[in-house]
Amino acid sequence: MTSGHLPVAEPADVRRAAHRLIRADRTAFTATLALNATAAIAGLGGPWLLGRIIDEVKAEAGVGTVDRLALALLLCAVAELLLARWARFVGHRFGERTLARVREEFVDRTLALPASTVERAGTGDLTARGTADVSTVGTTLRDAGPDLLINSVRFLIALVAVFVLAPLLGVVGVCGLLPIWFALRWYLRRARDGYLAEGAATSEVAEIVAATAAGARTVEALRLEGERIAASRDAIETARRTRFHTLYLRSVFFPAVEVSYVLPIAGVLIVGGVLYTHGAMSLGAVVAAALYLQQLTGPLDQILVRVEQLQSSGASFARVEGLARAPKATSGESASPVGDRIDVSGVRYSYGRGGEVLHGVDLVVRPGERLAIVGPSGAGKTTLSRLLAGVDAPTEGTVTVGGVPVVALGPEQLRRQVVLVTQEHHVFLGTVRDNLRIAEPGAGDAELWSALAAVGADGWVRELPAGLDTALGEGGHRTDGSQAQQLALARVVLADPHTLILDEATALLDPTTARHTERALAAVLEGRTVIAIAHRLHTAHDADRVAVMEDGLLTELGAHDALVAADGAYAALWHSWHGDRTSGTGNARPDL
């Protein structure tokens, strides 16, 4: 997998996935094949009976004979129609059930992705796969799949009928189809790569649009409109080129195929005419063979159209199925931690091809203590918090809780051990109750109100029209930044972890509310470990110990008073925060 991009499944993986989906509903699949084969066999009667009618008329047979053959021809046509409609109905039901399985697998695999994988890949790619690609796969399973089955069966049976009727004419017909085979091979060699490039370009457009919309205020404030427009135009131009390439492939493929359709029929009529004039074949046989080949045209045309569609949907399926190849968050139960102590030993970390961010950090976080991590911007505080929470794995070294690597814990275990809360938050569509029960599905109303009260959110929730049953988001109550953040903190209270990591968790709250919320959380989480990335130094003042990060290294560790007395890096930050001019930093408060 390319760094920063979600993987794409190989053709063999796609074939195995298709076989797995077929096996999951093999009864419907088998019924579809059987019904289509029966309908195709019924359809074979028409050309053969028409040939018989021609031969009987030429032999001056009576009207009764012709009428009986015509009635049989009509019955064959009706049987073919009814069987084909029944087959299509069964095939579409198979397609819809299979599409449901694809969607469910996609959601399960998406939820199993580590947060770091999603962040590096970007939401645009994941969104494009979950919308456009899944929709394309669904259309194929519902429409293209059944049509391809129907027409493939019809094509094969009609071709066999030509060989049974007149083997020589069957050979002539197959030779006439060879140009189509060569055109198809030319197309298939190029189509998959072309459609994969088109899908990747579409994902890039989606990513740029999503990023621009999410950062619209920042773009406007920093006057980055020109840069974002230029980036969007570049992405759209790339998407346009990829679409024009696949259009070129289709523009070459289909005209070549259309011209080739007439060759088998023309060959059979010429060779059959010669044989008929020499008395080696009846006129009815020549007409029947020509009609069988004419019958091939419709199914073959549909097969080629669906084959072209399968290249697009196959590329989409490869992108959807590619999530199976992505790294997964640990799902099984790992060894249970013994105790709650967190040990950071020789930890180094670098982001992809970027430089190293942490350069060998050693830290022990004792159970139940409140630890504040401070330092200038870019010192590695947030990176360390992500490693402590198991979001990322260290490049070197270990981060363990109770002797077990944090990244080895399954989602349920990790949620009970360590929870990271940042200023990034999300309010899900649904009621207040739904949003809170994400953390603890079995929580009762009393527990929900207690969690809201712990973070100071019970007041505004009680004022909502339906309280806990008030719908949030589009069409309901629109929460502001502070309310959304309080809901996120209330979910943490319900999750009840033994270690809570706060990284600007109260950044969107006003100073008074933030202080109240932090104190409320501290009271609720009494006896639990609290690690705060301190951007406001009053948090460090209240902590049991303070860890100072500088340039990816842990340079100081101790109680607030001891560090201030040591007159080192922390003391300089503290004096600067309070505007102490004697510290040499003036009145400016540094970005922590």
Image: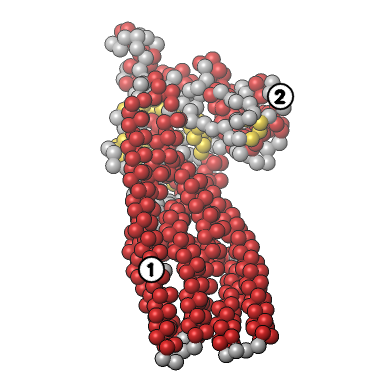
- The kind of secondary structure element at disc 2 is loop
Residue at the extreme bottom:
279
Q: Are marks 2 and 1 in contact (CB under 8 Å)?
A: no
* Residue to which mark 2 is pinned: 465
Asked if one can make out residue 345 in the rendered structure from this viewpoint, the answer is no
170 displayed left or right of 346: right
Horizontally, residue 343 falls left or right of residue 463, namely left
Q: Residue at x 33, y 45 (%)?
A: 241
Note whether 419 is above or below 191 in the view shown.
Answer: above
The Cα atoms of the two marked residues, 2 and 1, are separated by: 70 Å
Residue depicted at x 48% and y 30%:
424
Assess disc 1: are there few (<14), some (14-19) or many (≥20) residues with their C-alpha within 10 Å of its C-alpha.
some
- Whole-percent x and y of residue 192? 37, 58
Circle number at residue 61 = none
| Residue lying at the far front of the rendered structure | 60
Kindly identify which residue carries mark 1: 260
Which is more toward the observer, 22 or 253?
253
The amino acid pointed to by label 2 is Pro
Label 1's element? helix
Q: Residue at x 46, y 26 (%)?
A: 504
